[in-house]
Image (spheres, grey):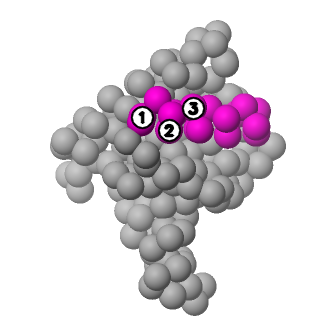
Amino acid sequence: MDARVHQGARQPVTRAVAVDLGTRRIGIAVSDSSGTLAFPRPLVARCGDRAAEHRAIGQIVDEVGADVVVVGLPLGLDGRRGPAARAAAEEAAELGHALEGRGVVVETFDERFTTVAAHAGLASAGTGTRARRARVDSAAATVLLQAWLDAR
């Protein structure tokens, strides 16, 4: 089965990987084997080579045996797709092509407020501002993935 990009597809999941696409970093989170809980993973640094970044994500997908990748879609507050959402959807499609042949489905999922929730969670855990900046992308991916898991 080839990788496909879906919006809101509902399928049984063994393992999922969430991707929070930033301009400097890509936040990563993975689900547990039951598809119930999300956990942060080390981020993927943007290097200017999107194919290399997608290969790094592919390595994580292979490592955890994921069958779905959830890409955050930064919709506007009114739910519309602005330039950032269109760019994320385009990159999700590229990632789908990069993962072809692995039996992985690539989906987009509304990520509004994930970064805000991640900052708030890290702050309430006593994480300082500098440390928070370094961890917020993977924390946002974790919030995104948990919301996706809960919505299923």
Q: Residue furthest right?
A: 33
Q: Is residue 151 visible?
A: no
Callout 1–callout 2 Cβ contact below 8 Å: yes
Decide: few, some or many residues near mark 2? Use Cα within 10 Å; few <14, some 14-19, many ≥20.
some
What label does residue 50 carry, if any?
1
Q: Is residue 7 magenta?
A: no
| Residue plotted at (41% across, 25% down) | 94
- Three-letter residue code for mark 2: Glu
**Quarter of the figure with the C terminus:** top right
Q: Within 10 angstroms of label 3, few (less than 14), some, or many (20 or more) residues? A: some
Residue hosting label 3: 55
Q: Are marks 3 and 2 in contact (CB under 8 Å)?
A: yes
Q: Is residue 60 left or right of residue 118?
A: right
- Start-end of magenta stretch: 49-66
Amino acid beneath label 1? Arg
The picture places residue 25, in percent across and down from the top left corner, at 44, 54
> Farthest top residue?
1
Q: Would residue 148 appear left or right of 73 to someone viewing this image?
A: right
Residue in front for this viewpoint, 68 or 80: 68
Mark with earlier residue (1, 3): 1
Instruction: Measure how far apart labels 1 and 3 are at the Cα level.
Output: 9 Å
Picture coordinates of residue 140, whole percent (x, y): 49, 60
Residue, disc 2: 53
Q: Nearer the viewer, residue 22 or 89?
A: 22
Q: Quadrant of the N terminus?
A: top right
Name the main secondary structure of what is drawn in magenta. Answer: helix
